[in-house]
Each structure stands twice: as structure tokens, then as C-alpha cells.
Amino acid sequence: MTVTSSERALLDSIDESDIIGLTTALIDAGGENPGNTEEKTAKVLAEHCRALGFDVRTVEVAPGRPNVFVSIGSDERPGALFVGHSDVVPAGTGWTADPFSAVVRDGRIVGRGSCDMKGGLAAVVAAMTAVLRSGLADEYPMTLACLVDEEDTGLGIRAFVAEPQHRTYSCCVVAEPTDLVTIYGCRGAANLEIEVRGRSAHAGQPRNGANAISAAARIIDIIEGSQAELDANPDPELGPATWNVGTIAGGTGTSMVADRCVVTVDRRLLPGESAAGVVGDLRSRIESAGLIGSGIDVEIGISMEMPGFLTSIDDGLVTTAVQSVIDNGSITNGHSAGCNPVLDGHSAGSNPVRFTDIWTASCDGGFVAQQMGIPTVVLGPGEIEKQAHRPDESVAVRQLTDSARAYALIATRIAALPGL
């Protein structure tokens, strides 16, 4: 697709130094979660966007934990929604510098959250700034929803999709790190806590008790046995749902029959599945196996649920996102800036390169697709598997700028699609 002269002017107006400045300020603000510390990051973002002339709204979803919504343009027509989060995973150990004092080194910004996803937030703001300064904001409205608690229980996204919407949206781009590959689907996730209660007794007479650990082991066998059924019924694009037993803890001493055992389990969900449905099925299997009774009882709780989503690869948002990445120059000679693309038979320049994919991770986009009913993709700077959630986390400055340029093109081009 040919970049028009007005699009070229829009792209050329995006200021790399502004992106670096906001990214570093957001990193320095911290926001470790668990820890409930997003407030300073939210304040930095809100004040920065107010100074730019954006419409800024904050909604506190828990004490000291505000969602921030920044918008440009008219609210009388559907706009492009961009979603990000203000929290980061704990810094941990192994850093060669202060994780919350960002530095720019060898063309990369280093600091906790640089990749996941303070850089993505800054790139969206840069795109919105360019559209606003072009005088086209009313024609191409944009909103950034910066939400709390994405890295833990999802308080921010749940509050957002549940509240009355102040604007309408034609599409959603989640600015998580994808190496500028357009992610059009991902599985959801549910964290389950299985509590098995038994009856204590002396180990010399174990039949006087009911061993919760032994019952839990049989439940794990049931879980692992059901994986074969899931493997036999995969989604054509997302693959099968999966189980993973994460932790097990129980008992009070070697010479005592365990009266309690707790197992935590990750269950990846296909679109259309719910955690409640998974729990109901698992409980039915446990009951059918005769595990409940004779001193054993089982409770299954849901500690976290995040739905999956799948947008048609032929949807206008997917094709627009891919073309926008290509047209702004992010992919040159088969390589997107700052990354090593995965080959899959598509071509760009002289080498094949991956433009679209599905994700094994989960994100807030599933809530948007499910609850708001709009096409959704994930697209952003950085590589989640190689750069995020580790010491010396970093993101390429060039990719931040490329992402901002892609976001600006998506927002302006999506408005021209039929029906929008």
C-alpha cells in the first residue's frame, strides 16, 4: 500500500526523543505488582497527557490504583482503542544497574518495564500526539486505556469493561510486546486452587484417617489424564487447551496422616471456554472417581480468569495492522527493526518474515473482545520471551518509534474501512 503524502507528514512528525523521555519517566515511576504501586506511574502518564492537550480521565478501581484514560478527537464517532497497563513484575535480582532508573544504552532503553510495557505506552502517546497536532483528531479519534493490575489479578481491565463506556470503539490494539508481529488470537488462562480436606490420624494407623495428599495425587492423575482429550480437540489456530500443575502443599508432619493439601493449577482456555465450566467438569470427574466421601472433601476455587480471543486473520484490523507495520518501514530486507523474525513463508524484501501469529501468553485483549465485542489484536515493541520479566529488561528505541508510526497509521486507516 502506498503511503500518502499526508500519512508521510504524520509519520515524520513523530519525535523519537519524546518517546524516550516518556518511556524513561514511566520506568522511573516503578509500579511493581504484586505490591499495588501503580499510582505514581499513572500520575506521570496523566500529567504528561494533560500537558499535551489530551482529554484525561482517571478511575480508581482500588485505593491508590487508578485506571487512566487519555483520548483525542470527537466522541461522536467510533475511535481506535489502545490498551496498556501501568504495573510491572517485581524487579528481582541480577540487575547490573538500578531497575527503576532507566538508562539508554546502545540504542536500547534498559529498566524494569521498558519492554513490558512502558515503551508501548509511550509509543501510543506519541502516535496520539502526532494525530492531534495534525488537526485530524476529530476524524480519527483515539483512546489509550492504561490499566492497573494486569500482571496479577486483572482488577483494571475488569473494572474497565464493566463500566459504562464514555466513547465507542471500532477496534482494539493491545500494545504488549510482540516484536511488531500482529497477534490475532491467544488462549485465555484460569488459575485454580484445589483444596483437599481429609482427616488426621497417627501414621501408625493410617486407616483411621483420610489422607488429603493421597487424594490430591489422584486428582492430579485425573487432570493429567484429561489432557489427552484436550489434545484431541484443538482449536484449528490456537491449538489445544492445556493443564499445568504449578504447586502442591500439604500435611503437617511425617508421622501424621495429612488432613489438608492444596494444589494450584493453570488451565489455558480456548475462546468460548470459561473457568466455571472447567471447574464444573473437573469436579464431576472427581466425583465420578469416588474421591469425595469417607473423610475426603474437595473445594475448587478460581483465583484468576482471563478470557482468550480470536480475530479472523482476514479482518480489516488484522490486515490494516500488518500493512501499517510494513508501510512505515518497520520491516526492511525481511527483518523488523531490532528483531530476528521467525520465518513462515511470507516475504518482505529478499527474505521471508512473519507478519502474523497467535500467542501462547494471555492478555487484557480477551476481556475487550469478549465484553466489548470489537476486533482485537496485540501489537507492540519488544520481545516478550527474550526481553520481558528478566534482569536488565530492555527495548530497542528504533522499535518504539516504529510502533508509534504503525499505531498512527492504524488509527487513521481503520477509520476509512467500510462500516466504520
Image (cartoon, rainbow, N blue to C red):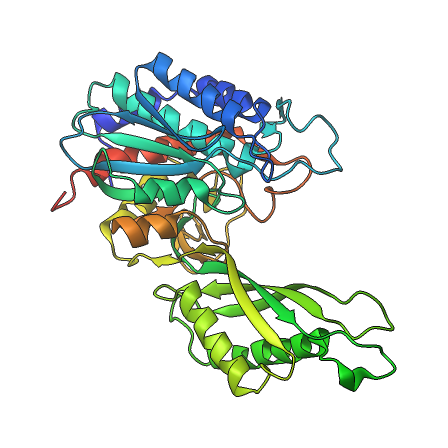
Q: Which quarter of the picture shows residue 141?
A: top left
State the image coordinates of residue 340 (x, y, percent, origin top left): 54, 47
View extreme (left): residue: 419
Residue 332 at least partly seen: no
Q: Nearer the viewer, residue 31 or 135?
A: 31
Figure check: 414 above or below 99: below
Give the total of numbered labels. Answer: 0
Q: Nearer the viewer, residue 139 or 8?
A: 139
Residue at 37% over, 52% down: 366
Question: Percent position (x, y) of residue 233?
Answer: 42, 78
Q: Give the x, y percent position of residue 55.
A: 28, 21
Q: Give the position of the C terminus as an image quadrant.
A: top left
Instruction: Tell which of 321 and 376 is nearer to you.
Output: 376
Which residue is at a point 51% across and 22% down the rendered structure image? Answer: 20
Q: Is residue 35 left or right of residue 63?
A: right
Say which quadrant the N terminus sits in.
top left
Q: Where residue 71 sits: x, y (%)? A: 29, 26
User: In the image, what residue occupies the spot 38% across and 24% down?
Assistant: 126
Q: Is residue 65 visible?
A: yes
